[in-house]
Image (tube, rainbow, N blue to C red):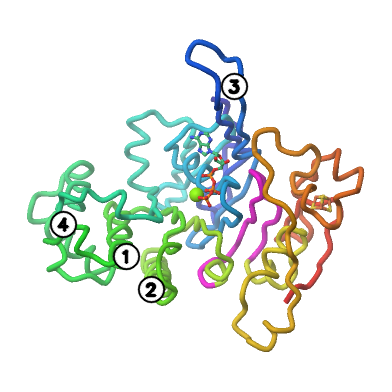
Amino acid sequence: MQTDSQTHMPDDISLSVRHLIKNFTVGGRWYSNKNEQIVSAVADISFDIRRGTTMGLVGESGCGKSTTARCILRLIDPTSGSVLFRANGNSEKIIDVMAESPEELRQLRQNMQIVFQDPFASLNPRMTVGTTIEELLIVNTNMDRANRANRVLELLDLVGLESIHAKRFPHEFSGGQRQRIGVARALALNPSFVVCDEPVSALDVSIQAQVLNLLSDLQENFGLTYLFITHDLAVVRQICDDVAVMYLGKIVERSPVEKLFAEPMHPYTQALVSAAPIPNPSRQRDRTRILLEGDVPSPINPPSGCRFQSRCSIGRTEQKCLEIEPPLTDVDGTHCVACHFPAVRSVI
Ligand SMILES: Nc1ncnc2c1ncn2[C@@H]1O[C@H](COP(=O)(O)OP(=O)(O)OP(=O)(O)O)[C@@H](O)[C@H]1O
Ligand code: SF4
Ligand SMILES: [Mg+2]
């Protein structure tokens, strides 16, 4: 694996991703590489997440959000790129995640955790919730039994569950409660960075709000930094400070969240924002929805030039868009856009 030569990061940054690329090889046979194809799942993306803040990663299904997260946590190895991480929120200790040995990675994972969309799938159905959380403490800490028991109860309390819940099995919980267990488990080893991969997508809207509030409270209390993955812009608006919009493996726009909604500059972001509901019913009625034509192209042989070109009403026939990939360019110090013809087109 190739890593970048980035060696430092500013004090206010918790995680710094540079030129991250992940290609999967599909097809072919065990005896031959013939018919093999390359899936360009993450295609050279870079971003920073500020300490104690939430960065949203949004985009349609298959655009590379989970692959990005899995590379950052080294659950899979990226093809190339670098990830620097400030361990324990400690300004002295910056870790080059890609250079970590398996043993170092095991320790690092105490500091970098993930909450999945479907916590049920990752909970052992035959273990009580108390035992599931205690297992983590047994494997990763030197706590004695009494301290582990106290810590389990403390974690359940932190996520709004009761001590009685420690004795119950996963199937005895509702969807929202299971997600609370997922959060308790993620927090068990005191991480400073948590990836939330669609943590509320499977929940009813009212339960979504409760889990989002819980995540916000925990962030405030423990200074957590979140990478929050979702396809739902309403959720982004509720919980994120900054947001990066992904399309077919690329970040096409990145900015503070309010700016992205007020002044979207990329035609793809404009379409997404125009389709997201807003709280004001009369303004909602007056809005024009920008409809995206066609489907997302395959990440096997993605379009040349701008990857969005086949669906873009502005650049579809522009030679430049067909031939040259637009770089992600800083327009005002906080707002970056990857488009040859960027323009604020208000959609609210
Ligand atoms: N192990 C794999 N082997 C081959 N292709 C893969 C693999 N994992 C992911 N992909 C492909 O990489 C692309 C990005 O997938 P990814 O799961 O990161 O998307 P996503 O944005 O998280 O989508 P969703 O919103 O549906 O979760 C998709 O085209 C997917 O099919
Ligand atoms: S670069 Fe061209 S095709 Fe791509 S989003 Fe901008 S205008 Fe559309
Ligand atoms: Mg995903």
* Residue with the mark numbered 3: 36
Disc with the residue nearer the chain's start (4 vs 3):
3
Across and down, in percent, residue 68 comes to: 54, 44
Q: Amino acid at mark 2?
A: Ile
Q: Distance between the Cα atoms at labels 2 and 4?
A: 23 Å
Q: Which residues are magenta?
A: 238-256
Residue at position x 43%, y 64% in the image: 200
Residue at position x 33%, y 60% in the image: 183
- Between 53 and 182, the one lying in front of the other is 182
* Residue with the mark numbered 2: 207
Which of the numbered marks, if any, corresponds to residue 175? 1
Q: Amino acid at mark 4?
A: Gly
Residue 98 vertical position relative to residue 53 in the rendered view, above or below = above
Give the main secondary structure, helix, strand or loop, of the magenta stretch.
Answer: strand
Q: Distance between the Cα atoms at labels 2 and 1?
A: 9 Å
Task: Say whether marks 2 and 1 touch (CB < 8 Å).
Answer: yes
Which of the numbered marks, if any, corresponds to residue 130? 4
Q: Amino acid at mark 1?
A: Gly
